[in-house]
Amino acid sequence: MKIIDAKRDAESDPLTTIVICVNERLGAASVSCGGTGSVAIADALKAGLQSRNLDAIVDEVHCLGLCARGPNIRFFPGGDWFNEVTVQDVPEILDRYAADMA
């Protein structure tokens, strides 16, 4: 997983949403987040948020514009980006979300 740190500070708007691309592009040569496991990642995020009692929406969208680097996730508003995410990365992503909420 690659992380692009948004460098949030005390004046940043509070995080409310974890945005994940679930787009599945057709064709063998078409790389997509949905084609590389993002639906399972979205499910793991939802389960992890619930088990940790974290208040957030998981917004499944159909493109974040970084298909070749997917699966892609972004904290919103104005939060960190995550590229090349796997289901195994979900605990670390949720740790970062919880830390940003504190």
Image (spheres, grey):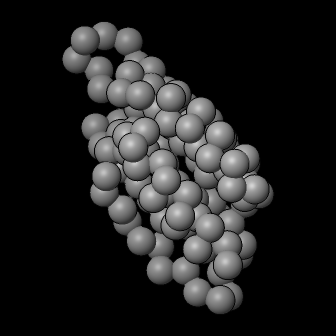
Number of disc labels: 0
For image coordinates 45% across by 58% down, the residue present is: 92
The answer to whether 73 appears left or right of 18 in the picture is: left
Instruction: Estimate the x, y position of residue 3 in percent, counting from the top left.
Output: 36, 62
- Residue 1 in percent (x, y) is at 31, 52
Residue 27's spot in the image, x, y percent?
31, 10
Q: Which corner quadrant of the image does residue 71 belong to?
A: top left
Query: Is residue 73 visible from the viewing direction of this image?
Result: yes
Residue located at (31% from left, 57% from top)? 2
Quadrant into which the C terminus falls: bottom right
Q: Position of residue 91 (x, y in %)?
A: 49, 53
Classify residue 16 as left or right of residue 45: right
- Residue 78 visible, this angle: no
**Residue reaching furthest top?**
27
Residue closest to the far bottom: 10
* Residue found at the very far left of the displayed protein: 29
Q: Is residue 96 left or right of residue 49?
A: left
The structure residue drawn at horizontal position 58% and vertical position 74%, both measured from the top left corner, is 99
- 68 above or below 79? above
